[in-house]
């Protein structure tokens, strides 16, 4: 039975177990809801009924909890029935997803039917290597609807990816309602034009692009995330990447002329002023957004913040003098410190891009290492937890291949991240000591969307690279040739699900 990600341990014996509708299930208290969700998503789709039974002997699937197992794990013995022992609800979900792979790929599509469902006999023991198996989605450069994000969560869950990092603001658009600061969406969620072709060509489409998540949209996303065992990780990126916010609230800008939501890609020099008022604004906004995601880890951005305006601003220079600072980059540390403290007081785990390492970093901040693996090494060496997201490996806005046939992407070759390259990613850099490795929470694939305007194109850039990434971060990547063979079948599931994945070709 083909599974991506591949399980940690598989020992098959001859024979298979075959089920017919209704699927008879016994489950410990606490696991019944997962089975109901599975029934809603999978059984109803193939026209099967779920029948609860009390005795394990009568069951097709018997699910029990074993709290001694590590999180998200399961052990499965398939003989007269499927006996599943799980750590928690997520482990049960993944075990059921594993068993689902016994259904033909066509049944992954909507409204299919199935006469008999067979799974091979044997033992499977499975658990993830990393707790953080993330996908990042930039909804600022191009907005993706609630249903697009829900669909992405379903696809993530199929691959056991469990953190969805939403990049909710940037120079080119503000995408989440903040009731105390209504202009963020009234003004900031719409730009009047976007680049056509590559940014370097300097052409504009003159077509407005807009969208944002209302409070009820966020609530819907949260409910769905919970049902798919996915943790949402909202990001508000400040003090850089702030032009859409400054178009809405120019009083927090360093310049006197009005700004519009940016219509070009790149890094705008328009950053938040280094003033007490701007700090309070950032804190207020971040806390209000964080309150929409109770208990979620919160990403405070912090990347690519040009200091040009601070260097020439009289007010910023005064602020530096007052605080005894010699380097304008220390001003960024002020934002990091203030936002991290406020979030931690509200019970949020705090993450930031690796540039924050250039100033003082509050204790307990998790660094998302994106510029290269060495940033992750530096963070771990300094005692910070790390999510590894180096662009050279897991930036899926990079080209899939060097072919001139590829659609325009963020950068030309050699910025290529082929399927094989992603599959070769090791997550833990070789030069990490054991203690440093202990700081690696996992890894995350990035979908920046300057050059991804539609759901189909998002599919093309994400799949099948996310399949490779899922196996890497689950910790079972081995022979690429074996993975590639399994993928031939797995992409048929994606096809049935309507995913516009990049076709498999010779070089991948
Ligand atoms: C980033 O790619 N600027 C985090």
Image (tube, rainbow, N blue to C red):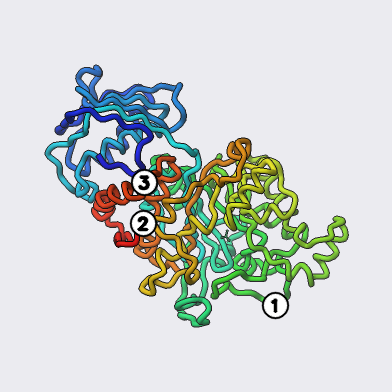
Q: In this figure, which residue is indicated by the disc labeled 2?
A: 463
Q: Measure the C-alpha gap from mark 2 to mark 1.
A: 43 Å
Spot occupied by residue 504 in the image (x, y as percentages of width and height): 30, 59
For this orientation, the residue located farthest to the left is: 115
Q: For this view, does 478 lie left or right of residue 436?
A: left
Quarter of the rendering containing residue 285: bottom right
Q: Quick one: label 1, few (<14), some, or many (20+) residues within 10 Å?
A: few
Q: In this figure, which residue is indicated by the disc labeled 1?
A: 257
Label 1 or label 3, whichever lies nearer to me, is 3
Identify whether 226 is placed above or below 89. Answer: below
Q: Quadrant of the N terminus?
A: top left
Residue at 34% in and 62% down: 507
Element under disc 1: loop
Q: Measure the C-alpha gap from mark 2 to mark 3.
A: 19 Å
Identify whether 430 is placed above or below 273. Answer: above
Q: Earlier in the sequence, mark 2 or mark 3?
A: 2
Residue at 38% in and 34% down: 8
Q: Measure the C-alpha gap from mark 1 to mark 3.
A: 57 Å
Q: In this figure, which residue is indicated by the disc labeled 3?
A: 479
Q: Is residue 422 in view? A: yes
Label 2 or label 1, whichever lies nearer to me, is 2
Spot occupied by residue 394 in the image (x, y as percentages of width and height): 48, 55
Q: Is residue 213 in view? A: no
Q: Earlier in the sequence, mark 1 or mark 3?
A: 1
| Of 425 and 353, the residue lying toward us | 425
Q: Earlier in the sequence, mark 2 or mark 1?
A: 1
């Amino acid at each position: 039975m083909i599974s991506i990600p591949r399980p940690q341990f598989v020992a098959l014996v001859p024979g298979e177990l075959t089920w017919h509708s209704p699927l008879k299930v016994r489950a410990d208290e606490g696991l019944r809801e997962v089975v109901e969700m599975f029934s809603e998503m999978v059984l109803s789709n193939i026209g099967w009924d779920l029948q609860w039974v009390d005795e394990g002997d009568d069951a097709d699937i018997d699910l029990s909890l074993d709290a001694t197992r590590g999180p998200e794990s399961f052990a499965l013995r398939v003989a007269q029935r499927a006996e599943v022992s799980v750590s928690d609800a997520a482990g049960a979900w993944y075990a059921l997803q594993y068993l689902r792979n016994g259904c033909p790929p066509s049944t992954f599509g909507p409204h299919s039917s199935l006469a008999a469902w067979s799974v091979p006999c044997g033992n499977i023991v499975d658990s993830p290597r990393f707790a953080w198996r993330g996908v990042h989605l930039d909804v600022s450069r191009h907005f993706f609807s609630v249903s697009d994000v829900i669909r992405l969560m379903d696809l993530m869950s199929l691959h056991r990816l469990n953190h969805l990092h939403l990049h909710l603001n940037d120079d080119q658009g503000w995408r989440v309602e903040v009731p105390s600061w209504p202009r963020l969406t009234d003004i900031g969620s719409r730009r009047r034009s976007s680049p056509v072709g590559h940014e370097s060509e300097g052409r504009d489409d003159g077509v407005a692009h807009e969208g944002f998540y209302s409070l009820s949209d966020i609530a819907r996303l949260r409910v769905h995330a919970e049902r798919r065992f996915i943790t949402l990780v909202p990001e508000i990126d400040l003090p850089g990447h702030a032009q859409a916010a400054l178009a809405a609230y120019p009083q927090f800008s360093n310049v006197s002329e009005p700004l519009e939501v940016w219509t070009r890609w790149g890094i705008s020099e328009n950053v938040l002023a280094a003033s007490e008022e701007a700090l309070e604004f950032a804190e207020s906004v971040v806390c209000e957004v964080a309150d929409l995601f109770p208990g979620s880890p919160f990403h405070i951005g912090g990347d690519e913040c040009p200091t040009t305006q601070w260097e020439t601003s009289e007010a910023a220079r005064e602020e530096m003098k007052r605080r005894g600072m010699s380097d304008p980059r220390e001003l960024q540390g002020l934002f990091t410190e203030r936002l991290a403290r406020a979030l931690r007081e509200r019970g949020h785990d705090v993450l930031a891009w690796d540039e924050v390492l250039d100033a003082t970093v509050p204790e307990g901040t998790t660094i998302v290492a994106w510029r290269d693996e060495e940033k992750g090494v530096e963070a771990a060496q300094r005692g910070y937890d790390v999510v590894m997201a180096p662009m050279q490996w897991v930036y899926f806005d990079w080209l899939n291949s060097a072919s001139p046939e590829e659609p325009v992407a963020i950068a030309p070759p050699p910025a290529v991240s082929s399927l094989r390259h992603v599959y070769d990613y090791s997550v833990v850099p070789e030069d990490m000591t054991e203690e440093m490795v202990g700081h690696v929470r996992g890894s995350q694939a990035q979908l920046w969307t300057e050059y991804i305007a539609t759901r189909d194109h998002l599919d093309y850039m994400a799949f099948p690279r996310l399949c490779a990434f899922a196996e890497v971060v689950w910790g079972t990547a081995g022979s690429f040739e074996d993975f590639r063979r399994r993928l031939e079948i797995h992409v048929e599931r994606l096809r049935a699900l309507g995913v516009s994945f990049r076709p498999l070709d010779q070089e991948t």
